[in-house]
Image (cartoon, rainbow, N blue to C red):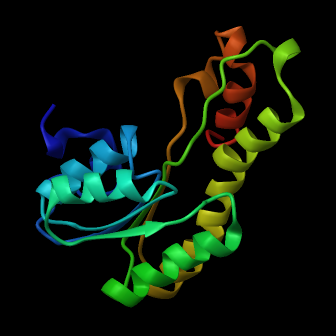
Amino acid sequence: MRSDDHPIASEAGMEGSEERKVVVITGGSGGIGAEVARRLGARGHALVLAARRQDALKAVADGIGGDVHTVVADVTDRAQVERIRDEALRRFGRVDVWINNAGRGIARTVLELTDADVDDMIATNVKSALYGMQAIVPHFQQRGRGHLINVSSFLGRVPMASIRSAYSASKAALTR
């Protein structure tokens, strides 16, 4: 798949775009977040990557080159999500696209899940997206433009794996 064909790039209005966008990606240290960052960085967009692991963030940023700012943050903490927004605005003066990508999965049957498992998954998969939306949408409203993307999962729509039931429920919260 070419970078300009990526569904997230298309959703954010960046497919074929010549305008340089400022893009914030939570969960930018690995998986989908890192891959989206690589593709957008290759197109010359300015990036703010946020995640808990500084070493992994640095590795992704170093592999991209260009204008990449990293923020070590725990997106399950509202104040830290607001700090991501504030650092992005200080560094680039605006945010054009915010991608709530941070996520956590647990593969256990319902009978094996602990309160801590469910609390952590809801905090990471649902509350972090809520915090991101509440942090950035006022900026978008003030500017009269902006794109917000919440990364979900097919399992949020079709919960077919019983060992992923809590994960499916948390991702379903992002799909409607």
Residue 28 placement (x, y as % from top left): 40, 52
Q: Judge whether 23 appears above or below 105 on screen.
A: below
Residue 173 placement (x, y as % from top left): 70, 40
Q: Judge whether 113 appears above or below 72 on screen.
A: above
Q: Is residue 142 left or right of residue 109?
A: left
Residue 130 lies in what quarter of the image? bottom right
Q: Nearer the viewer, residue 32 or 72?
A: 72
Q: Residue at x 39, y 50 (%)?
A: 29
Single out the residue that lies furthest toward the front: 55
Q: Residue at x 61, y 60 (%)?
A: 75
Q: Residue at x 59, y 64 (%)?
A: 132
| Quadrant of image for the N terminus | top left
Q: Is residue 144 visible?
A: no
Residue 146 placement (x, y as % from top left): 42, 71
Q: Is residue 27 visible?
A: yes
Residue 97 placement (x, y as % from top left): 39, 65
Q: Is residue 107 left or right of residue 115?
A: left
Q: Is residue 64 left or right of residue 165?
A: left
Residue 160 lies in what quarter of the image? top right
Q: Judge whether 96 appears above or below 121 on screen.
A: below
Q: Is residue 4 left or right of residue 8?
A: left
| Quadrant of image for the C terminus | top right
Q: Judge whether 152 appears above or below 144 on screen.
A: above
Q: Residue at x 41, y 76 (%)?
A: 145
